[in-house]
Image: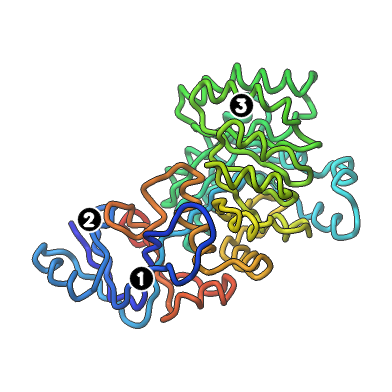
Amino acid sequence: MQKLIGPITQLLTLDNLLLKGALKDEKLEILENAGILIEEERILEVGSFLELLKKAKALNAEIIELKGDFVALPGWIDCHTHSCFGGTRARDFAMRNAGKTYLEIAEAGGGIWDTVTQTRKLTETELANRAVENANRHLSEGVTTIEVKSGYGLTVEEELKMLRAIKQADQKTTADLIPTCLAAHMKPRDFEGTNAAYLELIAQELFPILKSESLTNRIDSFIEKSAFSPEEIEPYYQKAKDQGFELTVHADQFTAGGSKVAVKYGAKSADHLEVSGEKEIELLAKSETIAVALPGASLGLGCAFTPARKILDLGGSLAIGSDWNPGSAPMGDLVTQASILATFEKLSTAEVLSALTFRSAAALDLEDRGKLKAGFLADFNLFPTENYQEILYQQGKLKPEQVWKRGKKT
Ligand code: NIG
Ligand code: FE
């Protein structure tokens, strides 16, 4: 059964925008008095509402007539979250603001390890339910595709529990969850052996199960002084690549080094990049690796933002993720974070909208979403406004009135 939704005051297709480089707002394709004709979970056509009305009638399609002004945009795609976790780290946040360093907090029992302890206490279903709660909140704000990382289990069994929980959560929410294995988040404190030995164990014992249970085809790591060095991650990534996994990296957050590994191993994305310098940015910009800015982590930690303007000006591709996690990015409001990044980094509306949609889809290697065009998934948001510029201007406060996922109103 086909459906026609409209009339829509402004429909931004985001079609014909390049995957890489700076984007001027004049390049945005804006259809006025538009409609979206859908069949099952996909878009059949976008265009003039009156023209589509004729087609819809001929097809005997259901006509869903909108009253008032609406702006239509593709569903947001959050390509980087840790939204499956146990407990809270409110204490870390307060301690950081009271002047404690990350290391002092870790020594006092905080940091990633604290969340690992709290996550390990939950059953797979309890954990799945937490992830569903977060996914549903994101979905209500228009985020229709959400990447979710493991990385708070840090043993073969506990990482499996997390990834099975994410799989379970995907069945329980209307949003699409894209799982990623982040067993290389840090060496767990209860592992007796070197970083290299831990990574070897993960590659040997966990990787084959990820494949056999179809838990994920994406491998992530945290390349940082407190986690893993580039030299430790390289053989790990080689093994992952040899087994056909796609790669992504937590890179250049506090010290540079990860972005080089990302480019060398052809990672789909290099995420964070707060301290990337000219050299790192140039390398990324020349590559196919998408740079992912995570303004939520800058806001949560009080650190500099990713040099997004420079990345785009040098010809790189920029996506924006929320990094939603209990430690560094507890807010999880993607649009608020993106519009704040835009004011500090001077990003055009076209650049931000692209970073939240098709460029973010590319970071996840998804080719069927992020634009409003024939053949793409009917994932879209209807904002109650006559002007698309209101969305970023209101810094996340203007929520979509309707969120459509795979051709269904949620
Ligand atoms: O992306 N940087 C490493 N990992 C997360 C933080 C995770 C945590 O603190 O729990 C991040 O910011
Ligand atoms: Fe992260």
- Amino acid type, mark 3: Tyr
Is the residue indicated by label 3 positioned so its CB lies within 8 Å of ligand 1? Answer: no
Distance (Cα) linking label 1 and label 2: 18 Å
Q: Earlier in the sequence, mark 3 or mark 1?
A: 1
Looking at the picture, tell me which residue is in the foreground, 333 or 86: 333
Image quadrant in which the C terminus is located: bottom left
Is the residue indicated by label 1 positioned so its CB lies within 8 Å of ligand 2? Answer: no
Q: What element carries label 1?
A: strand
State the scheme by which the image is colored. rainbow
Distance (Cα) linking label 2 and label 3: 40 Å
Residue 235: quarter of image: top right
Q: Nearer the viewer, mark 1 or mark 2?
A: 1
Q: Nearer the viewer, mark 2 or mark 3?
A: 3
Which residue is drawn at the image coordinates 81% and 53% (left, top)? 91
Which residue lies under the disc numbered 1? 11
The answer to whether residue 410 is seen in the rendering is no
Q: Are marks 3 and 1 in contact (CB under 8 Å)?
A: no
Which residue lies under the disc numbered 2? 39
The residue carrying pointer 2 sits among few (fewer than 14), some (14 to 19) or many (20 or more) residues within 10 Å by Cα, namely: some
Q: Which of the four quarters of the rendered structure image does ligand 1 lie in? A: top right
The answer to whether residue 290 is seen in the rendering is yes
- Please give the label number shown on residue 285: none
Percent position of residue 137, x then y: 53, 59
Percent position of residue 82, x then y: 62, 46
Image quadrant in which the N terminus is located: bottom left
Q: Are marks 1 and 2 in contact (CB under 8 Å)?
A: no
